[in-house]
Amino acid sequence: MLEYLLFVPLITGILAFFMPAKISRLLLVGTGTWNLGFSIYVWIERPEAFFNQYFKLSPEGLLVLLVISFLFFIVSLYSISYLEVTKLSNKSVYTGSMLLFLATMSMATISDDIIVFWIAIEATTLASAPLILLHKTKASLEATWKYVLICSVGIALALLGSVLMTISMDIAGIEVSLTFSELTNIASQLDKTWLKAGFIFVLVGYGTKMGLAPMHTWLPDAHSEAPSPASALLSGVLLNCAYLGILKTSGILFSADLGQFTGNVLIAFGLMSVIAGATFILKQSDYKRLLAYSSIENMGIIAFGTGIGGIAAYGAMLHLIHHSLIKSSLFLSSGNILLGYGSKVIEKTGSMTKHLPKTFVCFFGGIVGLVGLPPFGIFVSKLLIIIGAFQQGRYIVVGVLLVCLLLISAGLMRYVMKISFNPTETIVTLKEKPLLILPQLALLFVSIILCFWIPEPIYQTIIQSISGISGGFYG
Amino acid sequence: MIQPVNILSLLLILSVLFAFGSSGIIPIIKMIALQGMIITIVPLFLHHDLTTGSLIFGAILLMIRGFIIPILLYYSITHIIHKNELDPVCGHNASIFAGILIIIASIYISSKFDFPVIHKTPLILPAAITVLLGGIFFLMARRKAVTMVIGYLMLENGIYLIGASLSKPSHRVVEFGILLDVLIGVMIMGIVLFNIQRAFDDTDTALLRKLKD
């Protein structure tokens, strides 16, 4: 039954391409609502898949699935008003691509087979490329070209990584089906050298898609050129899907007693991303690129936490959830700013408190959450990751991390102050309709709630999802 | 059945050097067509348990990599872009020198491995790694959009050859690399569409330099 998550958005997505804008908008919201409902059903009932050799539920997949369906629902609500206000030439392409994008991402979360997962990640590139090109400007063409080319190279390297993992099976003389769960079970018998080589290629491959430095160069362009709701999905959930591949592959290596190696590689890539984020956030002229670099930084933090393991891995999973919530909220708010001021350049904005007071509340709240201040959830997740790193005595890396986080907070606060309070002569005519504000507030609100109270099933699932990494929560 | 594989592997290595030294796009397109044909034929010599499935797959791959993609590229150059010259980031002589370094590196890397297939056909793995690394170099060292697509094709060919020669054919992993050709199709479509629309005069990706930090 799991496959409904893939097929329903696929069919409605194809339909939406041929429908007039109004009907396709209804399809978007309808599918979003159905998808959220079905995901909750999947959480409660844990149904089997029709093709259970390819698709299987995993705790980490369930988490990402819930984040995807919740965010998609919120973004589809925002899209109703957004599509009324914005001047997109082809709205059916927008809705159709969004739905196909949802289908491919859901497919990635439920797939157990390594190749099926790989196909899903490749399909996300194909489904999201039209979204980046939607404005049909020179800059958006450049962003799409970069996105397709760089992610294609990444995905090709990930295939090479998967091939090397099959070689590690051949050398050990084992015949099992090529799924994450089976490989984790027999991981200790696999050939270690080839497994390591495979992991490096998989990490570089999916890391490209996840936005880990130094393979991140497509990310700021794509996120700044896509329409804001699409950026929210790209940043909020697509990066998580790619992370899922890295996490599952790390699970295999941890089971094969290569935890030390895997952890160090993840920490190195994570730290590089955080440093890259800190470097570019400090000097930035475009607020959507600012948010994009912050996504790179946060993906780095997630990889870092996973690499440290134990309580930090728990923090990383929390960070994944909260980053998705807060960053999508910020991208949606940045959509309002773009609609209001008509420019992505920070210098051309200003006095948001006067012109767009409600958007100001969402945007400012989001940035406060993003830099890691309470009561938002990122405060807890960053704290846990830092505590975990200190517990393991990794003082140097955590020192570098802390310095970078400080710089990033300073950079983000400086620019949000400029946008909010600087005097400006731009005339803003945008009316802040309820559906242009409430979705962001809902996302921030959920982050606050999850900071104080995590429902028991979600808590258990997080614990299960990190159980394979560094001995789990208590490791 | 060993001799043909060695000759074909040698051809692959030479094709990479040829691509590095060529100053026109059309000869490189012809080269990539030849390379596409060779990489589909080589695995047929390696594995003795040929099935109908693998033959059909080989035929499909031969059609796509050997004919369809090169013809599309050729068409886009002769009918739409009308420009045959390359302007490389890295000059031809330097590229050939880099190519030789890549070949040496590939031979060194493959000497570290111990597989039955290497003892029988010592050139296939160096050839595969050369094509792969050559593709990556080509992606970096050439500026035109079409040459980037060709570099990517070389990368794909290398991956296919590594997978087909080292991994057991029963796994059916590397065969899915054919799905990457969909991405190539998208890239070619992008090049063609935007040249027709004349969004900019030339598909020189050096013009795509607006977004940066």
Image (spheres, coloured by chain):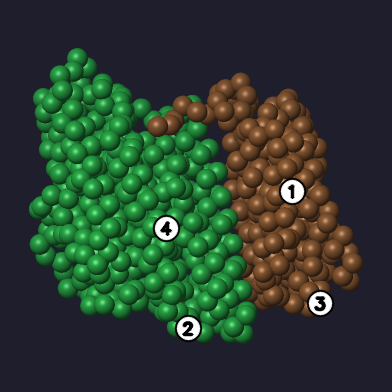
Residue at the disc numbered 2: A188
Please tell me if label 3 and label 4 are on a single chain: no
Marks 1 and 3: which is nearer the front? 1
Mark 2 neighbour class, 10 Å CA radius: few under 14, some 14 to 19, many 20 or more:
some
Please tell me if label 3 and label 2 are on a single chain: no
Q: Position of residue A171 (x, y in %)?
A: 62, 80
Marks 3 and 2: which is nearer the front? 2
Q: Can residue A144 be seen from the camera position used here?
A: yes
Q: Nearer the viewer, residue A20 or A458?
A: A458
Residue at the disc numbered 4: A242
Q: Tell me the residue at 66%/48% (across/down).
A: B135
Q: CA distance from mark 3 to mark 4?
A: 38 Å
Q: Tell me the residue at 23%/24% (across/down).
A: A349
Q: CA distance from mark 3 to mark 2?
A: 31 Å
Q: Nearer the viewer, residue A187 or A424?
A: A187
Q: In the image, which lettered chain appears green?
A: A
